[in-house]
């Protein structure tokens, strides 16, 4: 089976700054890929190129065997995306907003109602269904963003910091949701919480200064830490891989 | 497949979700009343027509249109939803056209709410209905052109106030280009060709015949061309600068 996400040679240059310098990434269905890196490493830029929001300076992206650059609408139909900060229209109620997303995704009548209901069910939004989004707490807003991304049950799900700013209970809920969807989807989530990678991901990719510095299982990542370190082992590996002095030694 | 309908519906209902648009609508109608009856002296003129109404109409749209169009893209940029809508399976062309249609529909609502003025002159006398209808068509086209300009300019900023001012300035210049003051000034030193060219890009030059009830296809095409050009510019601005 063709990889659900196939990014090849992705590069992005902003003026004279090379934000992303050649990233190759393939993700198959059933994989949950944790995308790690320090602030400014190029995580969001890479995700924005994969989702078709930014055009890459070089390289290409295929989503479910559809080329993002030549057939963007078809590629985007296969994909659910939660942008950083989960932006939603504050003046709409949850019901109106999800109905709007459903309509743009091409669902009508009872099918749309069924899709909205299923997404609301999965993200526990029943209690606020008829409330304007601007009146919701951060946790609820994040869940509205998630509901929007999974409304069409996409084979590819891309989430930029899905648990950022949530309390521990809300984080747990989101991770549970990701685990239940993981079986038949290719999921990419960016985070800078390392425990999240151990909790939900089957694969970890660390990028630093626009290039991939690690790609493997969370266990392999853990194994890179010296045996003498007992606590915060992942933090140690992360620091070793992404701090500047390692860069100069390589 | 075109998915305009949900965009138009969302954008149109967004005008009624916040009081801002309603406030502008009420101000527009209130000022329309003042300019038509007090300043334009509709009664005192003793003529059953809507000339005072249509003479001031473009100037009132000069502030209503930017108020309607300022949020179209600036707000998407400010709250970050531009990243959401442009990664949905819908083309930027559909987004731009859908938003403009919603804004235009709102402007047409404003025009429809001025119909009591028409009824007033119908009650008082026998007005030239062709001229009035032409005036309304002209006003609607003028509003459409202003809104296309406003939509494109709202795509360059995150700030709605900046979008408002930019749109008002550009629309003001396009209106003024047809005024005798400007043309006389140009006529003093520029060659007649220049003055003519300036006059021909003025929205007013193409509005005035309609006010008299003359709907010339060339004038309609002019407004359609302005709308098409600015919506096209709008699409390019979003495609080039959507992440900025």
Image (cartoon, coloured by chain):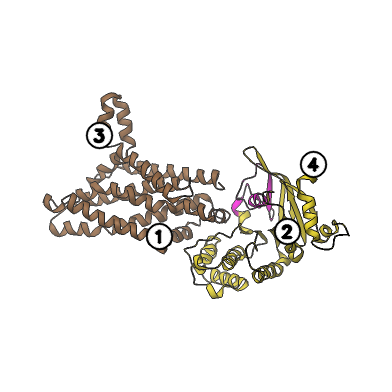
Q: For residue A189, what is the image quadrant?
A: bottom right
Q: Rounded to the nearest whole Å, what is the CA distance between mark 4 and mark 2?
A: 26 Å
Colour in which the image shows chain A: yellow
Q: Nearer the viewer, mark 4 or mark 2?
A: 4
Is A216 on the left-hand or right-hand side of B182? right
The answer to whether the residues at label 3 and label 1 have Cβ atoms under 8 Å apart is: no
The answer to whether the residues at label 4 and label 2 have Cβ atoms under 8 Å apart is: no
**Span shown in magenta:** A44-73
Let me know if marks 1 and 4 both belong to one chain: no
Could you tell which of marks 4 and 2 lies nearer the N-terminus? Answer: 2
- Label 3 crowd (10 A; few <14 / some 14-19 / many >=20): few
Residue beneath the point at 57% across and 54% down: B83
Residue A174: percent from the left, percent from the top?
66, 68
Q: Rounded to the nearest whole Å, what is the CA distance between mark 2 and mark 1?
A: 40 Å
Label 4 chain ID: A
**For mark 4, what is the residue?**
A248
Q: Identify whether A166 is placed above or below B105.
A: below
Camera-side residue of B226 and B71: B71
Residue beneath the point at 61% across and 70% down: A123
**For mark 2, what is the residue?**
A34
**For mark 1, what is the residue?**
B15
Camera-side residue of A215 and A79: A215
**For mark 3, what is the residue?**
B181
Q: Rounded to the nearest whole Å, what is the CA distance between mark 3 and mark 1?
A: 37 Å
Q: Identify whether B45 is placed above or below A168.
A: above
Label 2 chain ID: A
Let me know if marks 3 and 1 both belong to one chain: yes
Q: Rounded to the nearest whole Å, what is the CA distance between mark 3 and mark 2?
A: 66 Å
Is A104 a magenta residue?
no
């Amino acid at each position: 089976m063709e990889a659900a996400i196939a990014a090849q040679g992705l590069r992005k240059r902003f003026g004279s700054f090379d934000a992303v310098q050649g990233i190759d990434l393939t993700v198959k269905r059933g994989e949950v890929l944790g995308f790690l890196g320090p602030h400014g490493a190029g995580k969001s830029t890479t995700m924005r190129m994969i989702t078709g929001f930014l055009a890459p300076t070089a390289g290409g992206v295929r989503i479910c065997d559809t080329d993002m650059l030549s057939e963007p609408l078809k590629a985007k139909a296969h994909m659910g995306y939660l942008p950083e900060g989960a932006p939603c229209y504050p003046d709409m109620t949850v019901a109106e907003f999800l109905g709007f997303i459903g309509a743009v995704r091409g669902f009508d009548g009872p099918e749309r109602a069924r899709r909205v209901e299923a997404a609301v069910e999965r993200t526990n939004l029943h209690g606020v269904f008829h409330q304007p989004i601007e009146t919701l707490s951060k946790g609820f807003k994040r869940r509205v963003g998630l509901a929007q991304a999974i409304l069409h049950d996409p084979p590819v799900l891309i989430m930029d910091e899905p648990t950022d700013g949530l309390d521990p209970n809300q984080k747990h809920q989101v991770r549970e949701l990701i685990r239940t969807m993981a079986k038949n989807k290719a999921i990419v989530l960016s985070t800078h919480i390392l425990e999240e990678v151990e909790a939900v991901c089957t694969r970890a990719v660390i990028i630093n200064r626009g290039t991939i510095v690690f790609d493997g299982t969370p266990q392999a990542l853990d194994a890179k830490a010296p045996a003498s370190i007992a606590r915060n082992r992942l933090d140690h590996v992360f620091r070793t891989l992404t701090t500047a002095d390692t860069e100069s030694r390589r | 497949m075109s998915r305009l309908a949900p965009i138009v519906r969302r954008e149109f209902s967004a005008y009624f979700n916040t009081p801002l648009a309603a406030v502008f609508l009420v101000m527009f109608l209130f000022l329309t009343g003042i300019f038509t009856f007090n300043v334009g002296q509709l009664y005192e003129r003793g003529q059953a027509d809507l000339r005072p109404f249509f003479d001031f109409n473009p100037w009132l749209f000069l502030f209503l249109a930017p108020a309607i169009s300022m949020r179209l893209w600036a707000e998407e940029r400010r709250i970050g939803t531009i990243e959401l809508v442009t990664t949905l399976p819908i083309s930027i062309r559909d987004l731009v056209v859908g938003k403009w249609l919603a804004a235009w529909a709102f402007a047409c609502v404003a025009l429809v709410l001025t119909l009591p003025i028409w009824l007033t002159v119908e009650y008082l006398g026998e007005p030239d209905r062709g001229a009035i209808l032409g005036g309304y068509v002209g006003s609607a086209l003028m509003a459409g052109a202003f809104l296309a300009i406003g939509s494109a300019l709202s795509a360059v900023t995150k700030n709605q106030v900046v979008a408002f001012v930019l749109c008002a300035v550009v629309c003001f210049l396009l209106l003024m280009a047809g005024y005798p003051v400007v043309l006389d000034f140009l006529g003093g030193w520029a060659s007649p060709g220049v003055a003519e060219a300036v006059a021909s890009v003025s929205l007013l030059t193409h509005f005035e015949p309609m006010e008299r009830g003359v709907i010339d296809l060339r004038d309609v095409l002019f407004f359609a061309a302005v709308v098409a050009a600015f919506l096209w510019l709008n699409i390019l601005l979003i495609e080039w600068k959507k992440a900025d």
